[in-house]
Image: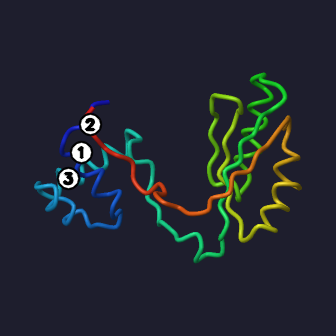
């Protein structure tokens, strides 16, 4: 799908403030309200815009620890990987999971209130996931550039 320059502007503005009114969005993009609304709906229908969320400060909601966990699984069968993915998806403390290339199979992003809570979660939940061969925890010391927006560019 080719994204137009106007749609790029809309996407950038919505990433910065998804609560912007349609009229304000249209004004900032330089078009009238109705065509702007139609463009936003089109982007939603095509799945470019997948939803709208509030961005929270994890520390202010009691999640002081962030950990990236590299996981290697025993078997590389499709069924084994699918089972692992299903179980990880159900874990609330795992806020992101990626299948990766290299010497491990998955990268999990985990949040916890403190180190003791993470240790309990790692030992009682992650270690007990199906097919775990090895895991390595990497603790975030400082968030320098957390994911906020994706760069939207002409394709």
**Vertical order, 140 against 68 (above or below):** below
Residue at 22% over, 50% down: 9
Quarter holding residue 103: top right
Q: Nearer the viewer, residue 56 or 73?
A: 73
| Residue 62, percent from left and from top | 65, 75
Quick one: label 1, few (<14), some, or many (20+) residues within 10 Å?
Answer: many
Residue drawn 64% across and 44% down? 97
Q: What number is the disc on residue 3?
A: 2
Characterize the local packing of mark 3: few (<14), some (14-19) or many (20 or more) Cα atoms within 10 angstroms: many
Could you say where residue 128 lies in the image, as x and y percent from the top left?
A: 88, 46
Considering the numbered disc 3 on the image, is that residue within a helix, a strand or a loop? helix
Q: Which residue is mark 1?
A: 7
**Cβ–Cβ under 8 Å for marks 1 and 2:** yes
Under tag 1, what secondary structure?
A: helix
How many angstroms separate mark 1 from mark 2 (CA)? 6 Å
Could you tell me if the residues under marks 3 and 1 are in contact, i.e. CB atoms within 8 Å? no
Residue at point 63%, 54% (across, down): 95
Q: Which residue is mark 3?
A: 36
- Badge 2: how crowded within 10 Å, few (<14), some, or many (20+)? some
* 1 shown above or below 144: above
User: Mark 1 or mark 3, which is nearer the start of the sequence?
Assistant: 1
Give the label on residue 85, or none.
none
**Foreground pick, 68 / 7:** 68
Say whether residue 74 is left or right of residue 88: right
Separation of residues labelled 3 and 1 (CA atoms): 9 Å
Q: Secondary structure at mark 2?
A: loop
Q: With respect to residue 62, does 121 lie above or below?
A: above
């Amino acid at each position: 799908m080719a994204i137009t320059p106007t749609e790029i502007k809309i996407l950038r503005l919505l990433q910065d403030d998804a609560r912007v009114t349609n009229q304000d969005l249209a004004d900032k993009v330089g078009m009238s309200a109705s065509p702007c609304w139609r463009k936003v709906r089109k982007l939603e229908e095509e799945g470019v815009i997948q939803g709208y969320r509030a961005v929270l400060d994890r520390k202010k909601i009691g999640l002081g620890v962030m950990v990236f966990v590299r996981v290697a699984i025993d078997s590389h069968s499709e069924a084994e990987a699918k089972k692992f993915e299903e179980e990880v998806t159900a874990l609330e403390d795992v806020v992101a999971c990626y299948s990766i290339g290299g010497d491990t199979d998955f990268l999990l992003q985990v949040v916890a209130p403190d180190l003791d809570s993470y240790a309990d979660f790692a030992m009682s939940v992650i270690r007990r996931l199906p097919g775990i061969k090895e895991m390595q925890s990497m603790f975030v010391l400082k968030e320098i550039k957390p994911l906020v927006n994706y760069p939207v560019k002409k394709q």
